[in-house]
């Protein structure tokens, strides 16, 4: 009785602050779930990869935001280049340059879609274990050592649209194994999860007549629901990206809160598991039925889905407000974007 009373007081307070419509949306977006398939549970609980030289590490990003930390100790003797963390896709390199004397020069380089390679460098001594933090935001690449002020590199203003600072796909990420450095405790502090799915029997030409936002809402709520971990629709941004056959491709970006290490990859695995098991498709079907979007035909279904999705350069999407193009694909552009090739 006490818990119910407290909940009622919370609802009344929320109504006073936000208005009844807002509260209904807040309390009802989790409604109409589909039953969780056992195989989805198993996929969601997949273990993180092991640590060690050459072993893969968890790094989940759509190319816009990375915040990762690790402990690094360089060998007392030896010279040459030491890969600290490697990316099979060539999206970035994190390398230590060991010279016969002096500190080790550590360089963090990223490969962008159109801007080329951008690098930042700092120095570390050999005689201690250091905490190294590498960060890539929408307009900077930074390296920090032991909690000190990081060294950052920003692209020159006006050289290219800021959208060109999006990083290439990372591929498989792993510890280096040069023998010149020991890297441990890699942790992703923050990142963005890219997702996409194809919905059949949803003609873009008909969705264009005022229904794009309705479908985006279905996608947003469905992704938040299967992601779990306390994520809400405001942590997910989705929009109709392109026509495909008799339907459309929907792109989504999940923005996990920066409250827990490794959350981005855990969310990515949970969404991937739900998509692989068919659970995500069932959730979408339920929400489509409740939304009653007239331009989505009977029998519409998720026929392809992936997390992470293939990275799409933000500049492939034309936004009505150009200043919004510097944001994450599918983020605040949502509702202001045309799929490539759409009228407008």
Image: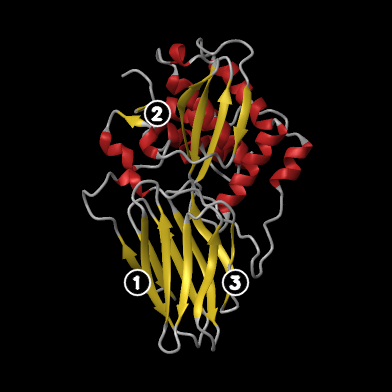
Percent coordinates x, y for residue 106 in the rendering: 43, 73
Q: Which mark is residue 14?
A: none
Residue tagged 3 = 184
Disc sitting over residue 19 in the figure = 2
Q: Secondary structure at mark 2?
A: loop
Q: CA distance from mark 1 to mark 2?
A: 44 Å
Residue at x 47% of width, y 26% of height: 216
Instruction: Measure how far apart labels 3 and 1 are at the Cα level.
Output: 22 Å
The percent position of residue 142, horizontal first and vertical second, equals 38, 64
Could you tell which of marks 1 and 2 lies nearer the N-terminus? 2
Query: Which mark is nearer the camera, 3 or 1?
Result: 3
186 to the left or right of 164? right
Task: Tell me which label, 2 or 3, sits earlier in the chain.
Answer: 2
Left or right, residue 104 beside residue 231: left
Residue 249 seen in the figure: yes
Q: Residue at x 58, y 22 (%)?
A: 287
Badge 1 marks a residue whose secondary structure is: loop
Q: Nearer the viewer, mark 2 or mark 3?
A: 3
Residue at the spot 49% in from the left edge and 41% down from the top edge: 311
Residue, disc 1: 149
Residue 171, given in percent of the width and then of the height, sits at: 56, 51
């Amino acid at each position: 009785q006490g818990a119910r009373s407290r909940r009622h007081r919370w609802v009344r307070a929320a109504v006073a602050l936000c208005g009844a419509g807002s509260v209904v949306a807040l309390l009802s977006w989790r409604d109409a779930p589909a039953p969780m398939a056992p195989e989805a549970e198993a996929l969601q609980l997949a273990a993180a990869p092991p640590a060690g030289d050459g072993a893969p590490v968890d790094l989940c990003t759509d190319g816009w935001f990375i915040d990762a930390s690790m402990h690094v100790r360089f060998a007392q003797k030896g010279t040459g280049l030491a890969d600290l963390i490697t990316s099979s896709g060539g999206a970035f390199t994190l390398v230590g340059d060991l010279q016969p004397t002096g500190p080790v020069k550590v360089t963090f380089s990223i490969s962008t879609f159109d801007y080329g390679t951008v690098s930042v460098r700092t120095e570390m001594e050999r005689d201690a274990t250091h905490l190294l933090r590498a960060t890539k935001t929408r307009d900077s690449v930074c390296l920090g050592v032991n909690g000190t002020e990081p060294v950052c590199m920003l692209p020159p203003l006006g050289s290219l649209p800021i959208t060109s600072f999006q990083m290439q796909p990372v591929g498989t990420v792993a510890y280096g194994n040069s023998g010149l450095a020991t890297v441990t405790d890699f942790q992703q502090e923050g990142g963005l999860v890219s997702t996409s799915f194809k919905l059949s029997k949803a003609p873009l030409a008909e969705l264009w007549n005022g229904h794009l936002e309705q479908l985006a809402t279905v996608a947003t709520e469905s992704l938040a629901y299967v992601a779990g971990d306390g994520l809400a629709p405001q942590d997910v941004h989705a929009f109709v990206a392109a026509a495909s056959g008799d339907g459309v491709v929907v792109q989504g970006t999940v923005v996990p809160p920066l409250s827990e290490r490794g959350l981005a990859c855990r969310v990515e695995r949970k969404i991937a598991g739900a998509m692989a098991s068919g659970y995500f498709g069932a959730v979408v079907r339920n929400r489509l039925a409740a939304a009653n979007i007239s331009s989505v035909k009977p029998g519409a279904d998720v026929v392809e889905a992936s997390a992470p999705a293939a990275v799409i350069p933000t500049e492939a999407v034309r936004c009505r407000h150009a200043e919004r193009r510097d944001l994450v694909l599918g983020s605040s552009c949502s509702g202001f974007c045309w799929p490539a090739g759409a009228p407008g």
